[in-house]
Image (cartoon, coloured by chain):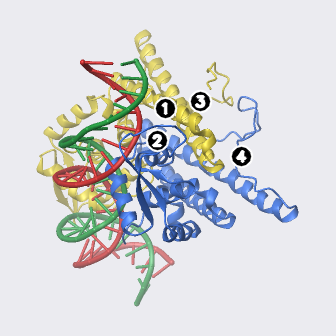
Chain colours: A blue, B yellow, C green, D red
Amino acid sequence: MRGRSDVLEPAILGLLAGSPMHGYELRKRLNLVLGSFRALSYGSLYPCLKSLAERGWIIGEESTTAVTERALASHRARIVYQLTADGKEHLQQLLASSGPAAWEDENFDVRFSLFGQTDAETRLRILEGRRSRLTERLETVRQAFARARERMDEYTLELQRHGLEQVEREVRWLDELIDNERGVSRARNRSGGRPAVATPHAEAPTPADTSPKKERG
Amino acid sequence: MRGRSDVLEPAILGLLAGSPMHGYELRKRLNLVLGSFRALSYGSLYPCLKSLAERGWIIGEESTTAVTERALASHRARIVYQLTADGKEHLQQLLASSGPAAWEDENFDVRFSLFGQTDAETRLRILEGRRSRLTERLETVRQAFARARERMDEYTLELQRHGLEQVEREVRWLDELIDNERGVSRARNRSGGRPAVATPHAEAPTPADTSPKKERG
DNA sequence: GTTAGCATGTAAGGAGTTACATGATTTT
DNA sequence: AAAATCATGTAACTCCTTACATGCTAAC
């Protein structure tokens, strides 16, 4: 039962797999993915780095030279962390796991952001897992919604409606991603295919809503 | 610094203002609002009820008679809670507050679900507060997005794009709600108006985006 | 007869935050 | 000269969850 939904560890390991980094830089990158916006505090980050280092998955080295692209001189001595061999192995294990934990709310975003390092089958399993999780929840909430409709005031109702809509939207997003992943697999099997990625919204140059999107109640 | 972002307390008080309830029932209602879906545990609920009772805002009374609409006999003795005079006063104070705390992520949903008991000016201030908070964040994220675009792989980029879209959608939702609230105030000032509520999606039969909304980069 | 739902609670623990502590460098 | 950004860390605390403990009733 320890560290079951640790969002931080995989995120850190995944980012360090890309390139070595110091804590401060790491936090900035992390904030783009984690919860999409909210600021992760140093009070979480540094202890986590320490613990990862103690378990031998990363090592930190002091460095005064410029590590990022920006040419900058002696700030405070930074500690640049990188994965060890053990750390890489551990990360591979994490990335290969595709159980329910991978598609829960708390973890999905991080796992998705690491899809670049994840194999196609695992990606698909996670996407499908999340989709079925969400549709299942939609069912539950819709039923509760229908049952309690009369007893709820209009604001609560409106909040509910908006919540449902947001989830429906995520399901459609997942649909597109899954189609895309499947398309890629098929393409690779037929031709010698490029490793083309699942970015459904990459095209669509015209402003908006000219596409044949279904209206939904 | 104690209990700053307590989501539970206002939610409980707000629900009990509607009608007295026992813990189990309370939880079910709470789960529809709180986080929209996720199950609040009894491990949070019961201690919170206890603490509210200790502070004299609610009182619990044992009851074997049917309280809800369902005719049911002696289950385990339920403890039905209701607001005290002090509790009602405290709730009024909570509902009148419209500071930043009211529109933060953790609290907004609960505050919104209590709009039925909130006066029109406070509603408007909270909605506008949240909107400006979100647009501000959109700006920040868009800038970070633009700066880091090249260094992010396609999946991270796609996650980002989807996140931005969801927030944009919430902003548009808020726009509609705000328009509606303003429309209601104006209508009430001109005519003797009914207390009509802000449910923007009740009508709107035509698809979307026919309104003169600015395109934004 | 066993699973599911009703109903209330406690104890231990996890994942994170805020506040504090420190100090250099760059921008305004 | 002040404010913002860079950079690392610790201690205390908070809110919430999980697991445990108990027991009754309805449905399958």
The mark lying in front, picked from 2 and 3, is 2
Identity of the residue furthest to the right in this view: A191
The mark lying in front, picked from 4 and 3, is 4
Question: Relative to the observer, which residue lies in front, B151 or B95?
Answer: B151
Q: Which mark is residue B140?
A: 1
Question: In this figure, which residue is indicated by the disc labeled 2?
Answer: A37
Question: In this figure, which residue is indicated by the disc labeled 4?
Answer: A200
The mark lying in front, picked from 4 and 1, is 1
In terms of secondary structure, where does tag 3 sit?
Answer: loop
In terms of secondary structure, where does tag 4 sit?
Answer: loop
The mark lying in front, picked from 3 and 1, is 1
Identity of the residue drawn at 46% across and 41% down: A37
Q: Which mark is residue B203?
A: 3
Question: Relative to the observer, which residue lies in front, A175 or A126?
Answer: A126
Give the chain letter at badge 4: A
How many marks the image carries: the answer is: 4
Identity of the residue drawn at 33% across and 57% down: A47
Distance from label 4 to label 3 (Cα)? Answer: 31 Å
In terms of secondary structure, where does tag 2 sit?
Answer: loop
Relative to residue B47, is residue B213 drawn left or right? Answer: right
- Asked whether the beta carbons under mark 2 and mark 1 sit within 8 Å of each other, the answer is yes
Asked if labels 2 and 1 share a chain, the reply is no
Asked if labels 3 and 1 share a chain, the reply is yes
Tell me if residue B200 comes above or below residue A58 in the rendering. Answer: above
Q: Amino acid at mark 3?
A: Glu
Tell me if residue A168 comes above or below residue B135 in the rendering. Answer: below
